[in-house]
Image (cartoon, rainbow, N blue to C red):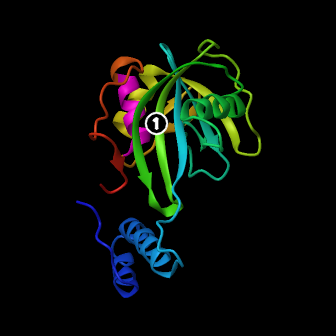
Amino acid sequence: MPMLLRAPRELELLAATDRGAALWAAAQWKHLAMRATSATGDFTRIDPCVLALVHAPEGVALLHRHGAAGDRWGAVAGYVEPGESAEQAVAREVAEETGFTVVSTVYAGSESWPPSGSLMLGFSVTVAEPFGAALVLDAAEHDRGAWFPRHQVAAARRTGTATVGGRPLALPDTPGLAQILVDRYIADAGTPGPPAYGAGHSLRG
């Protein structure tokens, strides 16, 4: 059930029991307040961004961001720049963050991210480089990057964590687009069907 808008005092009470829900509701309240104080009453801007799971039949390429919690790894992500299509943004972000050349992109679904005013578009991606090819990282964003075998990724999803080649691997632990991409890859080696949550998915939709 979608989280209803709450007044600031209600947010304080909610934060005492469910911080995640409070953050979600606070983002909605901020959006409403910005509309109310806008000279034109227009909706606030929504920024599109992309989430791309780079995969091969043998496994997936994942990244570890600076400051990420523990051993949590994730997919390529970034904002769509002016003049780009979503697919062009995927190709650019994959090249910038891994050094790989995108061969194909398959749209998988969308996810609303109100705290930053973003709409995330998810893609399953294949690249020209083979499984195990060295990643060329953007050192400003990531401190680690590696390929993980498919069966080990599946083990990490089942148990919450796994060790792959001596590297601890933890995957996204909240329902959302990242989990959809990983679960579809595990199920069918990265050929998405219809989005698992209908036309799209929101963090608390």
Q: Is residue 178 magenta?
A: yes
Q: Residue at x 65, y 32 (%)?
A: 145
Residue 59 visible in rendering: yes
- Extreme residue toward the right, this view: 139
- Extreme residue toward the left, this view: 1
In this rendering, is residue 202 above or below 137? below
Q: Magenta residues: mostly which secondary structure?
A: helix
In this rendering, is residue 45 above or below 65? below
Q: Secondary structure at mark 1?
A: strand
In the rendered structure, the answer to whether residue 74 lies left or right of residue 21 reads right
Residue 91 in which image quadrant:
top right
In this rendering, is residue 116 above or below 77? below
Residue for badge 1 = 122
Q: Residue at x 65, y 43 (%)?
A: 81
Q: Residue at x 34, y 34 (%)?
A: 158
- 74 or 112: nearer the eye? 112
Q: Quadrant of the N terminus?
A: bottom left
In the rendered structure, the answer to whether residue 31 lies left or right of residue 192 reads right
Q: In the image, which residues are magenta? A: 176-186
Residue type of the residue flagged with mark 1: Gly
In the rendered structure, the answer to whether residue 6 lies left or right of residue 61 reads left
Residue 112 drawn at (x, y percent): 42, 52
